Structures are given as C-alpha cells and as structure tokens.
C-alpha cells in the first residue's frame, strides 16, 4: 500500500545521527521546513565516536547545546605523550587555545545523539525512525523521494533539496552514483570501553603511550571509572574476538609498566580495519552528502564525526539563504568547494598519524614519533593544537585589500570578548548558524549608519533582518566613561581589537558558520559589496 504525502518540504534529511540532527536543527532555526528520517528504529546505545573538538563545541554553542554536552561529558585539556618506559615526551595542552572550549570533550555518541534528538523535538521536528529512503525521482528542480517503513508501508515525499547523512553505506550516495574512492588499512584497531582501576595518571587527561614494537596505547576518560582503551594489532579483524582484545590490552598495559592496573568488565569492545573513503562530489544538483556519506575517516585522529558536524553547519545556512533570500546556485557549489578539501586534508593528516603510530618502516616511524618532542616548541605546539581543535580549518577566499594579523577571510573568527550594557556579547549565539554578523570597529561617537551608509542598506535588503545583524564596536578606556558610551558593543580599552590587529574603521563580516566572510575598512567598502555579490551570484 502506498500513501502519498501531499505536503512538500524544503529539505529532506536522510539519516538521524549527529550529522543529520545538527543539520535539521540548524535548518529549523532558519525557518526552513525540514523532515528527517532514519532507517533504524532507535539510535545505537554504544559510545562509538566520543571525542568532540573545541570547534564542534562552538557549533553546538551556536545551537544552544554546548552547556548540555559539557554537563554530560568529561573535558580533557591535555594529551600526554609517553614513551614505552613511561617518561613524558611532550604534552599537547589545549588550555592554551583562545576561546571558551579549552579541551577535547569525551561524550558518548549515544549521549550526543540523545541531546540532538531532544533539541530537534524542541524545534518541532519529529525524527521519523524506522523509515528508509529507497529511491529519488528528480522532478524539475525538486525531488520525489520514495520511503519504506519497517512494517512494509511505502510513501513518497516531495522535497526541494535532499541531504544524505546516512553513513558510510549511504543509500543517497548510491542513488546519485557518486564514486567512493579510498582504501582499507591492514592494521587492525582494537577498542574497549571498560572499567579500569589503579591507573596512576590523571584520570581526566588523555594519555598516549608509544610502544617500541610499532603500536600505541591510548587511554581516554569516559566517567572517571570507565575508560576507552585503543591500540592496534597485526591480526586480521575477522580473527579477533573479545578474549583476544582483553588479553591484548593486558599485554600492552604490561609493556608500558602498568601491570598493577586492573581491568573490569567491558561495556563495549570493537575491532576493525580503519577505512578512508571520500565521494568524488558532495553535491549532485539538489542532492548533497554530509558526514560519513561523503567521507569516511580513520578514527586515529578523532576527527571524523566532528568533520561531519561541521559539514552540516556549513551547508545549513547556504540552503537557507538560497531558499529564503534566493541566493545564487554558486553558493551551493561552494559546499563541495569548501568541505571536500577539508576532508581530503584530514585524510593526509590521518595517514601521517598512521605512519607515526604503526608505520612498517621503523626509521620513518621513529622520525615521525620524534616530532612529539617538538611539542615543547611554542610555534609547533600552537600549530598542533590548532589542528586538534579544528580551529585551523580555513576556506578559500579572495585576497583582501587590507590585511590584519588576527583576521583572515576564510578562517574561523577568533572568540569574541566584547560586552554589552547587560553583559558579555555572545557572538556564537548571535550567529546561531543562521545569520551573518557585521562588526564595525569605530570611534566613540560614530554610528553604524554613518560608517557604512548604503552598504548597510544593501546587506539588510539582500539578507533580511533575520539573516543579518550589524553591530558597532566602541571602546572605553576608563570606568568614568561608563555612562558616556553610545549604544553598541563595548571593547574595553580596545583589547579585542588590538589582539586581532584591527584598526579603527575596520569592518568584519562573519558568516553564519563562524568563518570570516569579508574584511574591509570604512574608507573602501568594495570588499563587502563583492562578498555580498558573490553570495547572490547567478541568483534568479
């Protein structure tokens, strides 16, 4: 029996894991009509991908969810690298980052999914579980999607856009015929979420032991009692059972001098050969791929889920802008143009990590492992934690007519430390993954209108009030000026402006995903106009 859904939606999201749920929530916040389906009747209770990066937490903050995640997880600020004999080689200290999230958050993927599922419900979105996509018919610039429920009932739904967030075995990717190129590694990863007592190191920090035999032991906290243990072995994953995994971890713990550590009952054990695959295109007309449907990452860098979530934040505002403000089709092309290189760069990074951990060439492996000692060098340390945090992710952008040390178009906007009359200005929530924000750094008595004039009117007209906000930033150098400062944002003593290398008259346009769209000064605003024109290029 087939029932036809007569109500059309603007976006159908296929897959209700964290990637699909983030996309659905972000679209709903932009008033986009969205439905989300998943072939499974419930999400997995297993912890799976349990590391959230600072950049992902910033994305969750945009959706109002970061505090909930922090309450339920454990923040590891430091990653300690040890030799097999226990001496510390180097420490990656994410506490030296700028921003509000100074560490890697350990949170079960099941908990992350639950938080996002509730957030979707609060936005009026009911996840349609037990409902699979079987096929898509392209109808003009829309799509007729055929669905199959677990009880055998079929239905169809019309959607302007379709996003496949349905994992590494994506049906959406199969339907569009995207090539999925990559390889499976020979090394078998073993993981166990397990009770552990007698661990002598700081239980809330992460620890990595580098074994001479060409493997490693990673210890990640889960709740102070439970830990995740990760290592590798050169036995085919099909031959590895639970008893083998537990015995192997006992051997590895003994090898690094942790004989007194006692292992309890495992909650979850996994063994697999890491795979790295990437789709040749993340967009096929009005159909998009996100997360594992677009790129399957090795878990060695703990970046896969985080990269998928940032796919969703990148795509959501672009879809909304095309639907709401009739922005140009080129804006949708930029999703692949921006996110494909990020995934490809992570493949290269993961491959380097793999060579460092278990490379068969011993001299090459030892050379790469020696780089851990460089964590003591400030510049190298800063570069490494920028990668770990995903703050280093940057998108291609035209050369700006002016340059500033802390603000570069295409890069993440550094954390904002401005205030208002009622307290701290929350830039991430102001962005909300749904609107552009303009900051104009001005003298004490300038107004936003006098500085930007017609440029401000253009942004308001093209983007609309819900998708754009502009703020003027003043400075106060003493408490005596408290009642003499015009309305706007306050940068006390110019500390934020100075830290970014900005000057009076500089204007920064920040995209809804927190990346810098444009930089100009008020003597030449053409860069801002060029950015706006680019958003609406080829618009109907």
Image (cartoon, grey):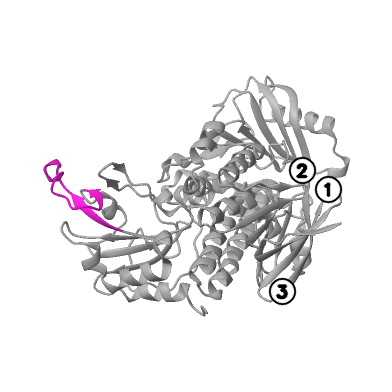
| Vertical placement of residue 182 versus 302, above or below | below
* Tag 3 secondary structure: strand
Residue 139 is tagged as 3
Q: Is residue 92 visible?
A: no
The residue under the point 57% across, 35% down is: 206
The residue labelled by disc 2 is 41
Residue 150 is tagged as 1
Front-most of 112 and 120? 120
Residue 421 position in % (x across, y down): 25, 44
Relative to 69, 530 lies left or right: left
The residue under the point 24% across, 66% down is: 449
Residue 510 position in % (x across, y down): 40, 60
Residue 374 position in % (x across, y down): 50, 47
Say if mark 2 contacts mark 3, CB within 8 Å: no
- Is the N terminus in the top left, top right, bottom left or bottom right quadrant? bottom right
Relative to 517, 480 lies left or right: left
Relative to 78, 125 lies left or right: right
- The mark closer to the camera, 2 or 3, is 3
Q: First in sequence: mark 2 or mark 3?
A: 2
Q: First in sequence: mark 3 or mark 1?
A: 3
The segment highlighted magenta reads 471-492
Spatial CA distance of label 3 from label 1 is 26 Å
């Amino acid at each position: 029996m087939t029932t036809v859904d007569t109500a059309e939606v603007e976006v159908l999201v296929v897959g209700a894991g964290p990637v699909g749920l983030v996309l659905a929530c972000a679209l709903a916040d932009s008033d986009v009509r969205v439905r989300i389906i998943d072939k499974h009747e419930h999400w997995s209770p297993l912890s799976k991908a349990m590391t959230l990066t600072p950049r992902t937490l910033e994305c969750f903050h945009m959706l109002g969810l970061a505090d909930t995640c922090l309450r339920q997880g454990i923040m590891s600020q430091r990653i300690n690298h040890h030799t097999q004999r226990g001496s510390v080689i180097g420490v990656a200290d994410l506490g030296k980052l700028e921003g509000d999230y100074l560490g890697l958050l350990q949170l079960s993927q099941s908990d992350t999914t639950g938080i996002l599922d509730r957030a979707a419900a609060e936005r009026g979105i009911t996840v349609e579980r037990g409902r699979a996509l079987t096929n898509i018919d392209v109808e003009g610039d829309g799509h007729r999607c055929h669905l199959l429920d677990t009880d055998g009932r079929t239905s169809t739904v019309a959607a302007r856009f379709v996003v496949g967030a349905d994992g590494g075995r994506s049906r959406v990717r199969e339907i569009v015929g995207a090539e999925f190129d990559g390889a499976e590694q020979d090394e078998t990863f073993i993981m166990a979420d397990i009770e552990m007592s007698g661990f002598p190191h700081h239980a809330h920090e992460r620890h990595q032991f580098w074994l001479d035999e060409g493997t490693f032991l990673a210890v990640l906290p889960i709740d102070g009692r439970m830990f995740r243990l990760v290592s590798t072995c050169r036995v085919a994953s099909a031959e590895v059972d639970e008893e083998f995994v537990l015995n192997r971890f006992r051997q590895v713990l003994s090898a690094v001098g942790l004989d007194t550590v006692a292992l309890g009952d495992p909650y979850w054990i996994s063994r697999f050969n890491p795979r790295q695959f990437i789709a040749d295109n993340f967009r096929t007309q009005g159909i998009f791929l996100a997360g594992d449907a677009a790129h399957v990452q090795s878990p060695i860098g703990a970046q896969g889920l985080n990269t998928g979530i940032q796919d969703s934040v990148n795509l959501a505002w672009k879809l909304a802008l095309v639907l709401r403000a009739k922005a140009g089709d080129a804006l949708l092309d930029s999703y692949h143009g921006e996110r494909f290189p990020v995934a490809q760069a992570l493949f290269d990074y993961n491959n380097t990590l793999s060579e460092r951990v278990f490379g068969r060439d011993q001299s090459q492996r030892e050379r790469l492992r020696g780089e851990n000692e460089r964590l003591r060098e400030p510049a190298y340390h800063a570069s490494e934690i920028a990668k770990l945090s995903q703050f280093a992710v940057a998108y291609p952008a035209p050369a700006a007519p002016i340059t500033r040390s802390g603000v570069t178009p295409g890069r993440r906007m550094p954390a904002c430390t401005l205030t208002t009359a009622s307290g701290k200005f929350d830039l991430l929530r102001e962005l909300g993954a749904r609107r552009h924000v303009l900051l104009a750094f001005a003298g004490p008595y300038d107004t936003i209108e006098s500085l930007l004039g017609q440029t401000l009117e253009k942004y308001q007209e093209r983007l609309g009030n819900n998708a754009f906000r502009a703020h003027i930033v003043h400075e106060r150098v003493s408490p005596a000026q408290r009642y003499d400062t015009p309305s706007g944002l306050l940068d006390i003593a110019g500390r934020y402006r100075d830290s970014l290398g900005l000057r009076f008259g500089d204007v920064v346009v920040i995209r809804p995903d927190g990346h810098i769209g444009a930089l100009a000064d008020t003597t030449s605003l053409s860069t801002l106009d060029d950015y706006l024109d680019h958003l609406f290029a080829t618009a109907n």
